[in-house]
Image: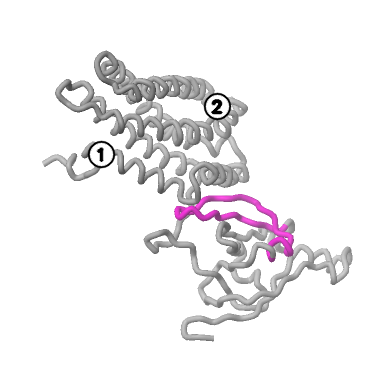
Amino acid sequence: MSMGKVVTRIRLTNHPDLDTLEAGRIPAAAVRTVELDALVDTGATELAIPREAAVRLGLRRARAARRRDGSQKTCLTTAGMAPSGARRTMIAIERRGLLVLGSALGAGLLTGCASVRAPAARDQHGAQAEDVFPPEDLMREHGVLRRLLLVYEESARRLAAPAEAAPTATVSAAAALIKKFVEDYHEKLEEDHLFPRFRKAGKLVDLVTVLAQQHEAGRRLTRTIQQVATSGAVGPGRPELVTALHAFIRMYRPHAAREDTVLFPALRSVVTPQEFDLLGDQFEDQEHALFGPAGFENVVAEVAKLEESLGIHDLAVVTPA
């Protein structure tokens, strides 16, 4: 024991196993139990345990959400019900080799021991991490898209002015990022996980049809932008590039706005609560597979470099006098 830190030995038991034992359907040796050293906090509602301990206790995943720092929070549950009828649910933070468990019934779940928890996950600035649910995740990815549209807009302005140097390298880099992050990742999530659910539910079908068509149109525009920008965008190619950039901007601003205000808020109405939460798992797994553990932050950093290359990185510049 040291100042400000108390560790105690605790025992965690699968409560439905106890109910089954009391009913005489299993022997005492079949009750799943683990003993662990835990950090005591009198105001805590969570407990960090090794993943293998959760497996030994027979916990299963009920739902999931992502924290802002990139860690995964998964709700685990036993199959049984508490005497009050409330399901015993446990909260888990994965991706760090530990599971952080918190009882929906409060500290009473940990019968005979103090309330315990591990330190809460924190972001890179030391602030406590918060959950990021699927609609918010998709909306912040739209924030990346909107910043890339600003890059396109400034590039088109310069390309339309014969006296300005053509920022072809910046346009090429922005188009590559749009293809990698927006088209091959973000839009793929929508096409694989959102659009089919809305179609199946018979909701917003006309909107989903137009959005899917615009995804295809956007990919055609991206191919044109990449081809022309790579060739140098000088001479006759310059007006073609400007036209393609303006068309992309013109389509994707209302596209993203309609998804943010209509489609994403309606997501909960076409999925079960469990499906809604598990989408966070699927989104994160795909993001990490394509971009690494700090994928979103790295993409934002790439966008910031593009903005800086055009001199549009200082937000204060656009503040009216």
Q: Are marks 1 and 2 in contact (CB under 8 Å)?
A: no
Whether residue 224 is situated above or below residue 25 in the rendered picture: above
Q: Which residue is mark 1?
A: 309
User: Residue at 74% of width from left, 60% of height from top?
Assistant: 58
Position of the N terminus by quadrant: bottom right
Q: Which colour assignment does the render follow?
A: one colour
Q: Please tell me which residue is depicted at 24% across the width and 42% down the height of the picture.
A: 313
x and y percentages locating residue 72 in the rendered image: 54, 54
Direction from residue 227 to residue 113 in the image, left or right: right
Q: Nearer the viewer, residue 146 or 158?
A: 158
Residue depth check, mark 1 versus mark 2: number of the one nearer the observer = 1
> Is residue 186 depicted above or below 34 in this figure?
above
Tell whether position 56 is magenta: yes
Which residue is the site of mark 2?
203
Sort mark 1 into few (<14), some (14-19) or many (20+) by Cα contacts within 10 Å: some
Which amino acid is tagged 1?
Ser
Q: Amino acid at mark 2?
A: Lys
Give the farthest residue toward the front.
Answer: 231
Q: Is residue 150 rendered to the left or right of residue 91?
A: left
Give the SS element for disc 2. Answer: loop
Q: Position of residue 108 (x, y in %)?
A: 63, 71
SS at circle 1: helix
Q: Of label 1 and label 2, which has the lower sequence position?
A: 2
- x and y percentages locating residue 225 in the rendered image: 36, 23
Residue drawn at x 62%, y 60% is 90
**Residue 285, picture quadrant:** top right
Q: Is residue 263 above or below residue 99?
A: above
Q: Which residues are magenta?
A: 53-78
Label 2: how many Cα within 10 Å (few below 14, some 14–19, many 20+) = some
**Quadrant where the C terminus lies?**
top left
Residue 177 at what x, y percent from top left? 40, 35
Q: Is residue 206 left or right of residue 241?
A: right
